[in-house]
Structure formats: C-alpha cells, structure tokens
Amino acid sequence: MRYLTTIISIAIACALLQSVLPWWSIALASFVVSLLTALRPGRAFIAGFSGVALWWLILGIIRDVRNEHILSSKLAVLFHLPGYISYLVFAMIIGGLTGGVAATAAAMLNRKR
C-alpha cells in the first residue's frame, strides 16, 4: 500500500510543481516524496519512474489532444520515430528515468541515516 501511495504522491507532486517550475522539478518532487516514504532503493526507483511516467503520460495526452497531435508529430519526425504515440512513450521514458534516479538518490540517502 505504501508503494502505491508513493507512486500517486509523486505524480501529484509533479503536477503541482510543474505548474510553477520547469520540467526538472519532477526530480525534486520524486526526491522529496521518496525521502519521506523511506523505500528501498530498487522499489524507490520503480516508484519514482512510475509516478513521473504516469504524470507525463497524462500531461502529454492532454496537451497532445488539445493541439491535434501537431507538435508531437513534428517532434516524432525530428527524432526519427514512427509516429506521435512513440514520441509520447519516448518522453514518458525520459521523464520516468529522471524521476527514478532522483528517487533512488533519496533512498540511498535514507540508508545512510
């Protein structure tokens, strides 16, 4: 239960911070939530990855539908990806890795205490 709560908390914290801060605030949100929940490093990475990836998937779909897939289609061409959906998955993975590494760093810091 704590694991699922951590994922949802990270997604909510990312949503709140990204409304006022740049994209890298996902690392800050993931770090702080993971620091407070004290998960083991492996589970923290998966929780950080999943929470940020979930938020970026939701945000990407909302923004993509609003502009009728124009931006994601052009970025898919730029990155030589087959379509706009693959770009959304690519962005989700990049954000997830950022959140996962930040959550792992917090978990490792917790182990030192």
Image (cartoon, grey):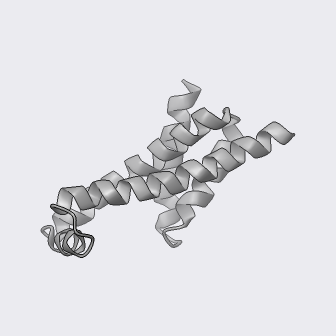
Residue furthest to the right in view is 113
Q: Residue at x 56, y 37 (%)?
A: 6
Q: How many marks?
A: 0
State which quadrant residue 68 falls in: bottom left
Specify whether 80 is left or right of 48.
left
Of residues 86 and 72, the one drawn nearer to the viewer in this rendering: 86
Q: Residue at x 32, y 52 (%)?
A: 57
Specify whether 75 is left or right of 69.
right
**Residue 69 position in % (x across, y down):** 15, 67
Q: Quadrant of the image for the C terminus?
A: top right
**Residue 11 position in % (x across, y down):** 47, 48
Q: Quadrant of the image for the N terminus?
A: top right
Residue 81 visible in the picture: yes
Specify whether 5 is left or right of 39.
left
Relative height, residue 93 to residue 65 (above, below): above
Q: Residue at x 55, y 30 (%)?
A: 3
Of residues 63 and 108, the one drawn nearer to the viewer in this rendering: 108
Residue 56 visible in the picture: no
